[in-house]
Amino acid sequence: MLKKKFSCVKVNQQKDGVTWVIFNRPEKRNAMSPTFHAEMMEIMTALETDPDTKLVIITGEGTAYSAGQDLKEYFRETDGNPAAKAAASANSRWRNEKLWMYNKPTISMVNGFCIGGAFTHCLCADFSIAANEAVFSLSEVNWGILPGGMVSKLVSDAFRPRDAMFYACTGRTFTGKEAAAMGMVNLSVPKKNLRRETLKLAKELLEKNPNVLRGTKHAIRATQDMTWRAAADYLNAKGAEIKQRDQARGHDAYAEGIRQFIDEKAYRPVFSPYVGAADGKTTEKGGKPRASAARKKKAPARKKK
Ligand code: COA
């Protein structure tokens, strides 16, 4: 449990393992100052090993998700002070390098303005859900720089080439709905449903085996820029790592998943994870699997022929 209080960020931890990280400079539209970055680096580092945190949701307080880098505090006030600039830049890596291969699932909940440098954490979180009404813009071209902080790279990887060029060179705004159609976010929903839909996805992810989920998200990230041969080796090694991590908690997802499906006919992997995936509690061999009402609702028990 993270007990410390921060000046630019709020951290709210739910009992089920969901931790909310809320950008808290609404009066500055959650623009990212050097202090904000230092706090975010500290928070994200701490949560990665915090036993009470299984999944992180990042979002903004007020009308903005984030208005990008703070033009005054991050840029102008560090000009001519290389040490301060370097420190701010190093701390701002929570958005790209840290989030990109984070050890726990992350969801970016885009509640309002998502501008410039904020594209980085929106795209580097594993999942993003936006309000239909959210407003996105690569505003850099309008005030004098190119989209740095890996934004150009992330946008050209995620968008269709024509969209990347168009929005980077015009700075035109687009809505959450358009962001979903372009693949910038997974989905967009009316703002009134944003929290509910985000928690629904969080709950679904929390039902998975965390070691399998971690290995899977790392595999999707890391193989993007690998050769075929390197990817094959990486995936083999990652599979072995999952087994080892599971073994440490006295579990074997692979054996358990197959056994419950083939021998016990207890669940169907197409509709839900096997029983006990999340907590690593293995059912008795040959015994009756524990049934959960939720799982039953999703996929009715298989009939024995
Ligand atoms: N850096 C520093 N301050 C910022 C900021 C930023 N990126 N974005 C907003 N603010 C500050 C404003 O200076 C203003 O502060 P003040 O009350 O002390 O004058 C306050 O936040 C509110 O801004 P305002 O423009 O009045 O809010 P709005 O709701 O009408 O508009 C935006 C919101 C995001 C559309 C507008 O503030 C904007 O264009 N911001 C710049 C965003 C940007 O270009 N970011 C790219 C950084 S890479």
Image (cartoon, grey):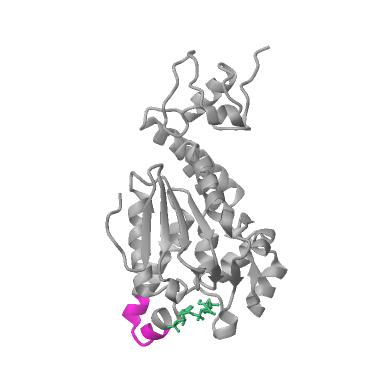
Indicate the position of residue 295 as horizontal and vertical percent values: 56, 29
Query: Residue, x 50% and y 73% (percent of image)?
Result: 67
- Name the residue at the bottom extreme: 80
Residue found at x 36% / y 75%: 86
Q: Nearer the viewer, residue 294 or 246?
A: 294
Which residue of the protein is positioned furthest toward the left in this rendering?
4
* Residue depicted at x 66% and y 79%: 170
Q: Pinpoint residue 20: horizontal percent, then vertical percent.
A: 42, 54
Q: Is residue 233 visible?
A: yes
Left or right placement of residue 42 versus residue 282 in this view: left
Q: Is residue 291 above or below residue 238?
A: above
On whether residue 79 falls in the magenta region, the answer is yes
Residue 189 screen position, x and y as percent:
62, 56
Total labels drawn:
0
Residue 44 makes an appearance in the image:
no
50 vs 190: above or below: above
Is 162 above or below relative to 107? below
Q: Nearer the viewer, residue 175 or 133?
A: 133
| Extreme residue in the right direction | 162
Tell me the residue at 58%/32% (across/down).
272
Q: Nearer the viewer, residue 294 or 125?
A: 294
Quadrant of the image occupied by residue 38: bottom left
Rendering quarter of residue 133 = bottom right
What residue range appears in magenta?
Answer: 76-86
Q: Position of residue 186 (x, y in %)?
A: 61, 54
Q: Does 183 lie within the magenta span? A: no
Q: Is residue 151 above or below residue 5?
A: below
Q: Main secondary structure of the magenta part?
A: helix
Relative horizontal placement of residue 29, taking residue 258 as reference (left or right) = left
Quarter of the image that includes the C terminus: top right
Is 270 left, or right, of 31 in this rendering? right
